Amino acid sequence: MQTDNRIFDDFARMAGGALNALTGLKTEIESLIRQQFESFLGGMNLVTREEFEAVQALAARARDEQEALAKRVAALEARGGEGQGDARPATGAAKRPRRPKAPDTVEKP
């Protein structure tokens, strides 16, 4: 009966050693996969979540401003569109007269 226990003990030790070896192998494979994945993602030039959310907020604010300006332009056109030929806003500065173009060729005497 004692020998049966020894055989079972040996099998148990062998199975435990195999499990430890498999656990170590699993850990090694996980670390290699993680390194490869990080290397792959590092080469893709991706943005962080914080950067993405900041740009998303900027875009939303710009869209809101654009919509408000579109409503304002529509209201201004509806209110002041009668009798005005030029819809451009006054800049406060008069236009300068154009200079005549210089001749392309100069005659030598």
Image: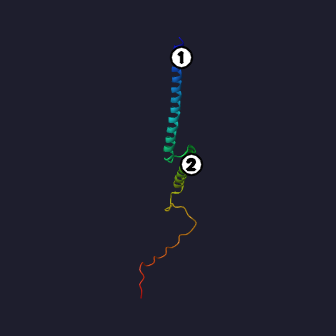
Q: Residue furthest front?
A: 3
Q: Secondary structure at mark 2?
A: helix
Nearest the viewer among 57 and 52 is 52
From what the image shows, is residue 71 above or below residue 29? below
On the image, numbered disc 1 is attached to which residue? 6
Q: Residue furthest top?
A: 1
Q: How many marks?
A: 2
Earlier in the chain: of badge 1 and badge 2, it is 1
Model colouring? rainbow
Q: Amino acid at mark 2?
A: Leu
Residue sitting at 42 percent across and 82 percent down?
A: 106
From what the image shows, is residue 37 above or below residue 98? above
Q: Amino acid at mark 1?
A: Arg
Looking at the rendered image, the disc whose residue lies closer to the viewer, 1 or 2, is 1
Residue sitting at 52 percent across and 35 percent down?
A: 28
* Residue 44 image point, x, y percent: 49, 47
Mark 1 is surrounded, within 10 Å at the Cα level, by few (under 14), some (14 to 19) or many (20 or more) other residues, namely few
* Residue 64 image point, x, y percent: 55, 48
Residue sitting at 54 percent across and 13 percent down?
A: 2
Quadrant in which the C terminus is drawn: bottom left
Residue sitting at 54 percent across and 22 percent down?
A: 13
On the image, numbered disc 2 is attached to which residue? 58
Q: Secondary structure at mark 1?
A: helix
Q: Residue furthest bottom?
A: 109
Cα gap from disc 1 to disc 2, whole angstroms:
73 Å
* Residue 61 image point, x, y percent: 57, 48
Mark 2 is surrounded, within 10 Å at the Cα level, by few (under 14), some (14 to 19) or many (20 or more) other residues, namely few
Residue 83: numbered disc: none
* Residue 71 image point, x, y percent: 53, 50
Q: Are marks 1 and 2 in contact (CB under 8 Å)?
A: no
Nearest the viewer among 79 and 45 is 45
